[in-house]
Image (cartoon, coloured by chain):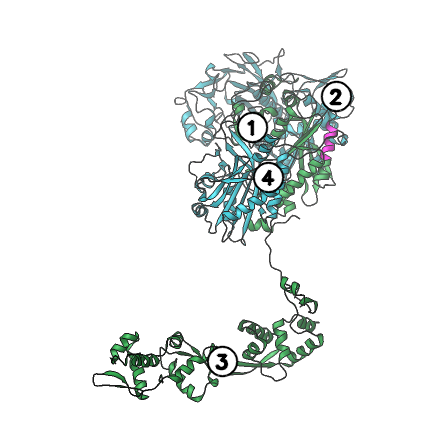
Chain colours: A cyan, B green
Amino acid sequence: MPKIELQEKTFFEMLGTRPSREELTELLTVAKAEIDDWQPEENNLRIELNDTNRPDLWSGPGLVRQLRVYQDGKIPEYTFLSKEGSVQQTGERIIQVDKGLRDIRPYIAAFIARGVPMTEAILVDMINSQEKLCWNYGRKRSTIAMGVYRADLMKFPVHYRAADPEKTRFIPLDYSWEMSLREILKTHPKGVEFGWIVENFDRFPYLEDDQGQTLSFPPIINSAHLGAVEIGDSHHFIELTGPDLDSLLVACSIVACDFADLGYEILPVRIVYPFDTAYGQELVTPYYFQKPVSLVVSEASRLLGEEISAEEAEDSVRRMGNPVTRSGNTLTVSPPPYRNDFLHPADVIEEVMIGRGMDSFEPVWPEDFTVGRLSEIEIFSREVREILVGLGYQEMIYSYLGSRRDFVERMNMSGEKVIEIANPMSESYECLRNSQLPNLLNSESVSSNAVYPHRIFEVGNVAYLDDRENYGSRTVTRLGFLFCDREASFNDVNSHLSAVFFYLSREYALEPVEDPRFVSGRLGAVLYKGRRIGVVGEIHPVVLENWGIQQPTAAGEIELDAILERDSEGR
Amino acid sequence: MEREQLIKELHPLEIRVLLHFGKDESVTPDRVQEELGYKPGQSNQAFSWLTAKQLIEETERRMSTEYSITDLGREYKERGTPEERVMELVRSVRKQGSLTLPEITNKLGLENKDVGSAYGALAKAGLLAMNEAKQVILKVESARSGSENTRELLELFDDLETVPEQDLSEAQKTLIRPLSRKRGADRGMFRVVDREQVSYRLTPAGLQAAKELRALGMTGEEIGQITPELLRSEKWKSATFRSYNINTPPLRVLLGRKNPYVEFLEDLKDKLNALGFEEFDGPLLETEFWNCDALFMPQFHAARDIHDVYYVKNPTHAKEIEQPYLDQVAACHENGWTTGSLGWRYPFDRDFTRRMILRSQGTVLSAKALPRAKVPGRYFGVVRCFRYDKVDATHLADFYQTEGIALGESVNLKTLLGLLKMFAVEVAGAKEFKFVPGYFPFTEPSVEIHIRHPELGWFELGGSGIFRPEVTKPLGIEVPVLAWGLGIDRMALVALGLNDLRDLFTADIEQVRLRRRR
């Protein structure tokens, strides 16, 4: 979940009130947000936003917009937007897109914001919310990256090019000498961090003005000259680039509305593509592309369990900041330009719910009669566990992930195949276990201080490879048990196993088998109705040595699903 | 009271000593062993306990000397002393001729000096002499062995381990001393032991205790351990039972136990079962399809990054995805299918959807349950999930999620709130709770329930919502489906008195043995 850092003074000035902690907590629920940290003396307010589809709330102005409309019901109007059939004038404000970008990073959206001198406070908030937008909604800049420039110094038309990585050179932000695009990827901190987005292409995205002055190398870094906004500047050029047009346009509208809310005048920019886009070859941004969504109010009443009138539903939706019209029992919502999360009438129903207030819905006991039931394997596992407890065994419960060293090498099974994670976070969690014995032996290796004898067991899942399965693997429930004492032997664990089967009212047999984890001749494969379902025996001293265990140890492992399967085959 | 306790807790070994000896009578280990039949160990215990309780006190300490027989002495006793064996040999060869000393030594297999000193003694006693050929001959005809006194000493050790010096005659004392180790001879037949004899007597407190024991009729013959033999003999009918010190710290017992965390999960399952939910479970490895696609999470969703789920090296892909669900879900992502949704409007990747990952959310089971769900129906699972998280006190790489669904014609937001209230009251034992709007990619509307826990304060107990039609319709369900998940880890920690999630899965046997539910 995204968290945003706000300067609380600015935030409450924009909100127009300074609520108490409790009031703010209550108010924030409208935006599915909560206070994460609030330090008034440090002018700091950190808020966590739970809705990952509402990037418009991840800035001070955006959050205030939602909270204010909920309180005063006034939906802000933004007149700078273009849409199909209603396109704004742009004059010379044009960006020309190179056709070579089509398969690299094709789309760009931009606008001019002017009229308010940049302050330290605005700049800090703007940088914070821009980062959040590009990192979370823009998936670490891969789908959205943004730049802000000194519009006074640049000359339209701006050119968005596919540039030669070696020949194209400029001075990047935070540096004082020229570098090629390739060098920036290798040495500039931002190049190192975000280089993966473009490094596999022959050409790199590059933005320059009509005089050949560099604006930036999207999505990596701005130029040190045009791309370094200064306090006092009141004329900014803002652009966003990315491979997905809809999310780019939403992001552009979000940023434009935020600037507008801060008092800026927004001037649109015309983008000229040499190829087709979903909205034509020429697109004036900020652009409104959202489609209206209709809701039959009775649907809302049914899903919310409350009879809601069309008027009431309309009010609730409007309170949430959504322009809405009503025709009889049908509402038609035009999503605000900064939102793109209305996919289905159900999304409008939620607006009705929140706008009307959670407290207006009374909890009702569900009336349907249904029969509760534990799964067959759960009931069987409980029987097994009870017998093990009666035999003096302590139940354990383990993590299912571990290292190859523990699961394979220490078990004296070098050729064993286990399910391995392709992107492990650490060596300690790189494999999914295919046996409980390593876990039980690990317990022994860390418990030599515990009074002997040790009798421990676990009933839990293991997973192993199986080509016959659709998933190439099987997950099963097993009983694993281990006995460790001065004279622990095969005979002990076999006695325990026989007690388990006796009280399960079932019979088992053992047959000789070889297994490098056990002492040859002192182990058996456990057979149930002719099928091998496990193994029991004395752990080989090599394995004990690998685990640093200095007491004789015997153990067994039984697949419980297999017992139930065999039983049902017989039925 | 203290005194009464002291009397009651006297051990039979102490009682019998106290009762046996009178005022000023000398109490010694020897007498106790002889007269009360104690073994040395029992007598040591009795003396040490009684001394510690100041019921007896030392009166005298003196040294005494005792003799015991050595291995050599035992050999001589059985096979004859050198004197006896030289005399016998000389007599037995007399008819054939005579032997020199080296020949005798040879025949008897003894050492030179033993034969030499035996001849010396026998010659001195006038029994043997030597002829001109240096052969040993009988000086007089007699039946004597020449070492009758030594034999008498050896025979003393027939029954006794040790013989006190004072029990020997003066002549025997004179004889035994040079034959004993520590008084000259290295290889003696006897060993001399100097022993300290300590004498005690009853203290006034001891005499008082004896008086009280008599008054109580306690004899030290009271029954301690009740044995099968005792029960059979019926002696218990006339005996009394000794009181035990019930405040002695009891010994630790190692017992078999369920794991308290598993018990916590078991209780949770029982409660959900009691609330009409049927349990479901599934494999640890899942496809992208069921884990996310079926839940209408777009394939480009941030939570599906390589840094959020564990991919599997082998098998990398499932062979196939069940139809018609694959086509319907794919269409739903691309254009909303017949659900009335706009869909996510991107080309659905049918290769990516077969990709295997470690199950990252319990909701996958809710989705999988839908095609076969009963209507109305309620389902739940307490399932192990995997997250790409750095393991620390508040994050685990694998952990349990509690998830479920309730579906039917009559379910709606208000019954969802009812369900959440039921969980708050019945599962978490909360009295105060509140609902706030929530967000989940697969539910709309979405609601969280926050509860005031007696120890944790306000916290989010669970997330829930009504499955989006884009989730339910492609899986063949036309009625609303309430989906919910409960966060139980923090409650589990409180219930087990822990504050580190890693301790839930500890490998340490002693920690688990000592862990209790609060």
When the figure is inspected, residue B506 is found, relative to residue A365, above or below; the finding is below
Of helix, strand and loop, which one carries label 3? strand
Residue that label 3 marks? B196
Of all chains, the one bearing label 2 is: A
User: Distance between the Cα atoms at labels 2 and 3?
Assistant: 110 Å
Q: Earlier in the sequence, mark 3 or mark 1?
A: 3
Of all chains, the one bearing label 4 is: A
Left or right of B186 in this view: A411? right
Of helix, strand and loop, which one carries label 1? helix
The reply to whether label 1 and label 2 mark residues of one chain is no
Q: Amino acid at mark 2?
A: Glu
Residue that label 2 marks? A314
Residue that label 1 marks? B302
Asked which quadrant contains residue B308, the reply is: top right
Q: Tell me if I can see residue A140 in this picture.
A: no
Q: Amino acid at mark 3?
A: Glu
Q: Residue furthest left?
A: B133
Magenta segment main secondary structure: helix
Q: Are the residues at dot 1 and dot 2 in contact (C-beta closer than 8 Å)?
A: no
Asked which quadrant contains residue A290, the reply is: top right
Q: Are the residues at dot 2 and dot 3 in contact (C-beta closer than 8 Å)?
A: no
Q: Is residue B416 magenta?
A: yes
The reply to whether label 3 and label 4 mark residues of one chain is no
* Foreground disc of the pair 1, 2: 1
Of helix, strand and loop, which one carries label 2? helix
Span shown in magenta: B412-421
